[in-house]
Amino acid sequence: MSLPTIAQAEMLAAQFSNALLQFSPESVAVIGCAGGNGFDRIPSTTKRVIGVDINPSYIASASSRYLGRIAGLEFHVADIQACPLQFDPVELIYAALVFEYVSLPAALGNLSRVCRPGARLVSVLQLPSAHVHGVSQSRYQSVQVLAPLMRLIPPGDLAECAASSGFTLESEKTLALESGKEFSIQVYRHAAG
């Protein structure tokens, strides 16, 4: 995702940074944290950072890069759709290119349980395109195993499912990359109390 022809890693890190600047959370959970993309942009005002990924290798990589460099950092190997998450509630959840691979009701239900009252959920969804592959072509052929697992979610479907888990859509924008891929960035607020 960081190849110049794809440029998704930079965009995802920038959207994470924007959310941190906009909401100034003291606690944040990054769902699908991979190797820690964007962790270098976490401000010192964020006191607790939770990295969550289903892939233990990604967690090991992020841990070796960032443990000891970011205060209050912890990592969890977890499938967000399979079981309750094992960390205290946070003020912000950032979930980029995750919902395309999970059961929305199960995942959003689990995320809802780790939200503090009034917490925000920032999602990044890839939008369908007639001209661009869902999983980008690159020299790394191993990523193509994701293609059959990926299903692009219409932003309205995510909003509807999120509402049933206590999330209200606050804002939405579309972002296009030079590659031709388009993304929907949605901000939700979790019901207070």
Image (tube, rainbow, N blue to C red):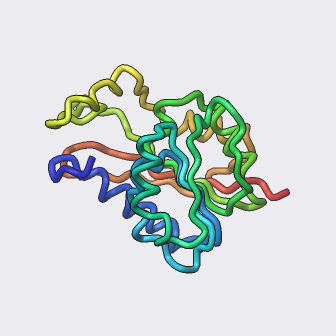
Q: Position of residue 119 (x, y in %)?
A: 69, 60
Image quarter in which the C terminus is found:
bottom right
On screen, residue 99 above or below 27: above
Q: Position of residue 42 (x, y in %)?
A: 48, 71
**Left or right of 100: which side holds 83?**
right
Query: Residue at point 62% right, 32% down?
Result: 81
**Left or right of 107: which side holds 141?**
left
Q: Nearer the viewer, residue 156 or 82?
A: 82
Residue lying furthest bottom in this view?
44
Q: Nearer the viewer, residue 26 or 163?
A: 26
Query: Residue at point 59% right, 27% down?
Result: 103
**Quarter of the rendering containing residue 151:** top left
Query: Residue at point 35% right, 53% down?
Result: 175
Q: Position of residue 96 (x, y in %)?
A: 46, 48
Query: Residue at point 38% right, 60% down?
Result: 13
On screen, residue 108 above or below 93: above
**Left or right of 99: which side holds 113?**
right
**Quarter of the rendering containing residue 127:** top left
Q: How many marks?
A: 0
Residue lying furthest top in this view?
148
